Image (tube, rainbow, N blue to C red):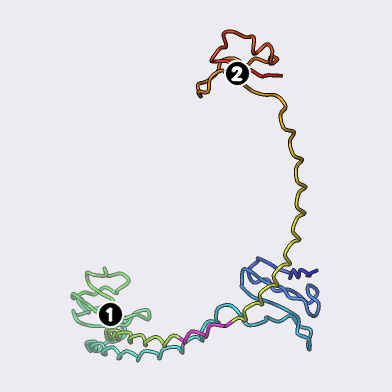
Amino acid sequence: MDSKIVPKKSTQQNKVPSTTDLILGEIAINYADQKLYGRHPGTGDVVEIGGGGGGGAGPTGPAGASGATGPSGSTGLQGDIGFPGFKYDSRRVLSNQYIAGEIIEYGGSYYICIANNDALPPTGAIGVYWNPYSFIGATGTIGLTGATGLAGDVGATGATGIGDAGATGATGATGLAGDVGATGATGVAPSNTILKNTSDLTPVNFLRVLTQTDYDALTPKDDNTIYFIK
C-alpha cells in the first residue's frame, strides 16, 4: 500500500520554520512566499531548498555627484564715507552748534545731523534733526545655489531564482472490479389467455375475467372490452 507524505506548511508571508518545527529529513512549504525549507544535514540549521521565488533586488545605484557650488554673489556696493565725526563736547553752547551733515557718536551709537540744531539726539526729534547712521556698506547679493548633481544609475535587477520542480506523485492503484450480480430468475409464463373481440388497436373501456364457457356463451361481445379467460 502506498504511503502518503504530507509536508508541514504555512500560508503566512515571511514565515520561516524553526529547528523545533522540523527534524532532519522533514520539509516545510511556505505557500505565500513560494519557498521550500528543510534542515541542513551538516549544521542542522533550517535552510531554503532550491532557491525558488523571485530574485533579490539589485544593489542600489551609486549616489550622483554633488552639484557644483554656485558662484559667489557680487560684493555689495561700498557705503558712502561719512563725514568726520567727533564726540560731543559739553562746552559747545553756541546756537546752531550742530550743522546738517555732521556725524556724532552718542551713547555708543552714531547719528547724522539732518538740520542745523543745538539739541542732542536723545532730546532732539529723530527724523527732524537726527537720523541713525551706519558706516557699514550694504550686504552683497547672495550667489545662486549650484545645480543638483545627476542621480546615480539604478542597480541592475537581480537574477530570478530557478526552483527545482517537485517530483510527480505515484499513480494510485486501480480499485478491484465489483462482483457481477446474479442472473435474475426466469419469469413464469402466463397460463391465462387475454382476448379482445376485435383486432383493432382502439382504446378499451373495460376488463372482464370469465371462463371459456362463459366467454363462448356471451352474446353480443363488446368491442371496447378486454376479456381474461381463466
Q: In this view, does 85 lie above or below 186?
A: below
Near-viewer residue (58 or 211): 211
Image position of 59 (left or right of 102):
right
Q: Is residue 140 above or below residue 96?
A: below
Residue 229's x, y, as percent? 68, 19
Q: Which residue is painted at 63% across and 69% down in the image?
A: 31
Q: Indicate the secondary structure of the residue bearing disc 2.
A: strand
Q: Residues within 10 Å of mark 2 (few under 14, many from 20)?
A: many
Q: Residues within 10 Å of mark 1 (few under 14, many from 20)?
A: some
Residue 118's x, y, as percent? 24, 75
Foreground label between 1 and 2: 2
Q: Give the range drawn in magenta.
A: 155-162
Q: Give whichever of discs 1 and 2 has the lower sequence position.
A: 1
Near-viewer residue (163 or 126): 163
Image position of 67 (left or right of 3):
left
Q: Name the residue under label 2.
A: 226
Residue 213's x, y, as percent? 69, 13
Q: Disc number at residue 16?
A: none
Asked whether 20 falls inside the magenta stretch, the response is no
Which amino acid type corresponds to the residue marked 1 in the rendered image?
Answer: Tyr
Near-viewer residue (122 or 72): 72
Q: In this view, does 66 lie above or below 198?
A: below
Which amino acid type corresponds to the residue marked 2 in the rendered image?
Answer: Ile
Q: Quadrant of the C terminus?
A: top right
Q: In which quarter of the image is the N terminus?
A: bottom right
Disc 1/disc 2 C-alpha distance (Å): 145 Å
Near-viewer residue (45 or 174): 174
Task: Report which quarter residue 56 is drawn in.
Answer: bottom right
Q: Name the residue under label 1.
A: 133
Residue 136's x, y, as percent? 30, 86
